[in-house]
């Protein structure tokens, strides 16, 4: 424990220097991959009971939420098997130890439900083409695609993949994805970097027969393979937009597209494996064509690494966003791997990300590494980098219309807290316009209202609840609250009415009363407004019409306790009904006044 405290102190010292100081972003994508293959992250063993599996996942979410994360990417399909009751493929062996054996519950439904309770996005992570890691040791169910469709398989050493060149394979994988999209309330579909296999010395991928049969006029095998992947990526993109236009789509490609050279000036200043030519993944094109909502390049290298310098690759990916998002795949598993991956490396990377306009956040690989809190990194997220909550980045190309405004915000002061309540906007059947969450802003004392500053976000509700209890209040402090609505894409509404209240404790808790009188009433030209303050307070005195619009502001200043008077001349107003509104630190009072000229 002493070591962890020392490390956390070191993080705080690092973050306090002027060089590293940054304004916390109001919107930032903060996520982690949860790998299920080989029981890497979840479940930790093939022998866990249902209760133990559920508890492990709840612990994962709680740890990530504590660190400040707002999304998870869970691997739901690793080797053409599933961690949900698939209509196409057998249950994964990671759940029970035997492929095809049911765990007697629906893990995917459970995980989505738990994410909803915490206001976290759930992205379903699919491996599109992987079939078998090793054909000599694999024990597969009779319903597995390797048994049902062996003619779809390509061999690469002992591994087997689905042949990306076959139209029936592309259709099949799209059907698998679409099944999940239709039956589950996921927020996104995600692929990693496994399309064609990574090159290995001495191994050759023989897709001659497919190339001959389906070459579509290509005379270059590499271009044909890239086009096979392009066709699939576009097919998924088009399908999602047609079926559920609120489901996001993204891929985490290998971190280098192409190295810059005389023949490829658009590449990065790197010298490593190239996804374009080595695994036939044209990730730059996917972004340029608008098929993806985001790219999450796997930049698992440190700043200064000669072959693939992190500080070189981040700006390169920023420049190929083409109006979409970039989330950096962060190598959390590398922390403490060697001297380059010291306590400062990852926080420096995150701060570097924030300097680029199209880099909207991070996805950490992997969950186990993040939970392990190596070198106190998870603590540093909670205490510094992710100290303030963040809304998700908006995707204006998918939905730019904000939801309706919450109304009737009221605050009730209790001995140990302040209770807020508000009215939810009228329900709608339009999924993109439906209010899903609320943001509570709090401004202490006389701090100017600024809804762009994340430091004033007191809380983001996980659901569409209409109440919040603020238990972090201090005696005598003045608090102003505002609430906004969020929709599926986290578009934010305009602000609700504001309420101001004085925090107190049970020792000095009193109920303040306000008196407000208007005379004469009705009046013809001018009116006398009298009110009494039991305690000194900041006062706003205003006149409103029948529609609630402010037509005159009479006072907006601090007033001492006692009787207050104010004259109002209504020469510029037409005959009608008006309302005098008095707002103080301890309540609001309204009186009707009738103007008869």
Image: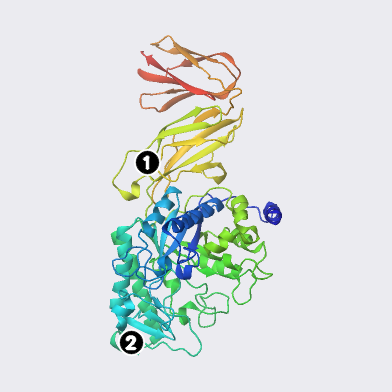
- Given residues 517 and 129, the one toward you in this image is 129
303 with respect to 188 (left or right): right
Check the image and name the residue furthest to the top.
520
Q: Quadrant of the C terminus?
A: top left
Element under disc 2: helix
Residue 484: x %, y % from top left: 44, 40
Q: How many other residues sit within 10 Å of disc 1, few (<14), some (14-19) or many (≥20)?
A: many
Indicate the quadrant where residue 350 lies. Answer: bottom right
Q: CA distance from mark 1 to mark 2?
A: 54 Å
> Which residue is drawn at the image coordinates 54% and 78% (left, top)?
260
Indicate the quadrant where residue 167 lies. Answer: bottom left
Residue 110: x %, y % from top left: 39, 55
Q: Is residue 486 above or below residue 517?
A: below
Q: Is residue 116 visible?
A: yes
Indicate the quadrant where residue 37 lies. Answer: bottom left
- Given residues 60 and 438, the one toward you in this image is 60
Residue at label 2?
A: 211
Residue 324: x %, y % from top left: 44, 61
Dot 1 or dot 2, earlier in sequence = 2
Q: Is residue 79 above or below residue 378?
A: below
Element under disc 1: loop
Q: How many other residues sit within 10 Å of disc 2, few (<14), some (14-19) or many (≥20)?
A: some
Disc number for residue 404: 1
- Given residues 395 and 12, the one toward you in this image is 12
> Which residue is drawn at the image coordinates 34% and 73% (left, top)?
232
């Amino acid at each position: 424990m002493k070591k962890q405290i020392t490390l956390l102190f070191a993080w705080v010292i690092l973050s306090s220097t002027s060089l590293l100081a940054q304004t916390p972003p109001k919107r930032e994508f903060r996520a982690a991959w949860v790998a299920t293959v080989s029981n890497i992250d979840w479940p930790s063993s093939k022998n866990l009971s249902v209760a133990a599996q559920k508890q492990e996942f709840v612990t994962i979410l709680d740890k990530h939420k504590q660190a400040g994360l707002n999304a998870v990417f869970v691997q739901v399909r690793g080797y053409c098997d599933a961690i949900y009751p698939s209509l196409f493929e057998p249950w994964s062996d990671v759940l029970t130890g035997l492929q095809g054996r049911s765990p007697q519950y629906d893990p995917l439904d459970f995980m989505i439900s738990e994410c909803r309770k915490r206001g976290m996005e759930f992205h379903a992570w699919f491996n599109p083409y992987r079939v078998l890691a090793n054909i000599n040791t694999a024990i597969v169910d009779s319903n597995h695609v390797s048994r049902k469709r062996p003619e779809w398989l390509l061999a690469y050493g002992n591994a087997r993949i689905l042949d990306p060149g076959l139209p029936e394979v592309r259709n099949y994988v799209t059907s698998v994805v679409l099944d999940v999209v239709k039956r589950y309330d996921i927020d996104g579909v995600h692929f990693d970097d496994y399309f064609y296999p990574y090159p290995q010395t001495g191994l050759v991928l023989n897709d001659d027969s497919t190339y001959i049969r389906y070459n579509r006029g290509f005379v270059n095998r590499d271009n044909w393979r890239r086009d096979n992947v392009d066709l699939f990526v576009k097919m998924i993109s088009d399908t999602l937009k047609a079926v559920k236009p609120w489901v996001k789509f993204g891929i985490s490609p290998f971190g280098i597209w192409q190295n810059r050279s005389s023949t490829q000036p658009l590449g990065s200043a790197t010298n490593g494996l190239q996804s374009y030519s080595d695994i036939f993944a044209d990730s730059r094109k996917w972004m340029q064509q608008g098929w993806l909502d985001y790219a999450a390049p796997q930049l698992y290298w440190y700043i200064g690494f000669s072959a693939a310098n992190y500080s070189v690759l981040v700006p390169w990916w920023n420049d190929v966003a083409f109006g979409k998002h970039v989330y950096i795949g962060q190598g959390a598993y590398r922390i403490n791997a060697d001297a380059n991956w010291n306590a400062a490396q990852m926080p420096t990377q995150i701060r570097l990300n924030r300097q680029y306009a199209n880099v909207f956040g991070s996805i950490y690989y992997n969950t186990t590494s993040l939970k392990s809190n190596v070198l106190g990194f998870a603590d540093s997220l909670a205490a510094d980098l992710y100290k303030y909550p963040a809304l998700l980045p908006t995707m204006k190309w998918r939905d730019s219309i904000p939801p309706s405004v919450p109304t009737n915000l009221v605050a009730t002061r209790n001995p140990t807290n302040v209770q807020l309540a508000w009215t939810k906007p009228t329900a709608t059947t339009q999924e993109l316009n439906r209010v899903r969450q609320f943001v509570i802003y709090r401004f202490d004392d006389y701090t100017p209202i600024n809804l762009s500053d994340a430091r004033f976000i007191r809380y983001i509700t996980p659901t569409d609840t209409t109440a919040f209890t603020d238990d972090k209040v201090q005696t005598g402090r003045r608090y102003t609250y505002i609430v906004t609505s969020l929709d599926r894409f986290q578009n934010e509404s305009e602000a609700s009415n504001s309420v101001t209240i004085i925090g107190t404790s049970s020792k000095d808790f009193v109920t303040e009363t306000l008196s407000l009188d208007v005379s004469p009433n009705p009046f013809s030209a001018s009116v006398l407004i009298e009110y009494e303050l039991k305690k000194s307070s900041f006062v706003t005195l205003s006149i409103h019409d029948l529609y609630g619009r402010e037509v005159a502001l009479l006072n907006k200043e601090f007033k001492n306790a006692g009787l207050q008077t104010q004259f109002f001349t209504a020469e510029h107003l037409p005959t009608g009904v008006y309302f005098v509104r008095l707002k103080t630190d301890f309540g609001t009072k309204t009186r009707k006044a009738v103007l008869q000229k």
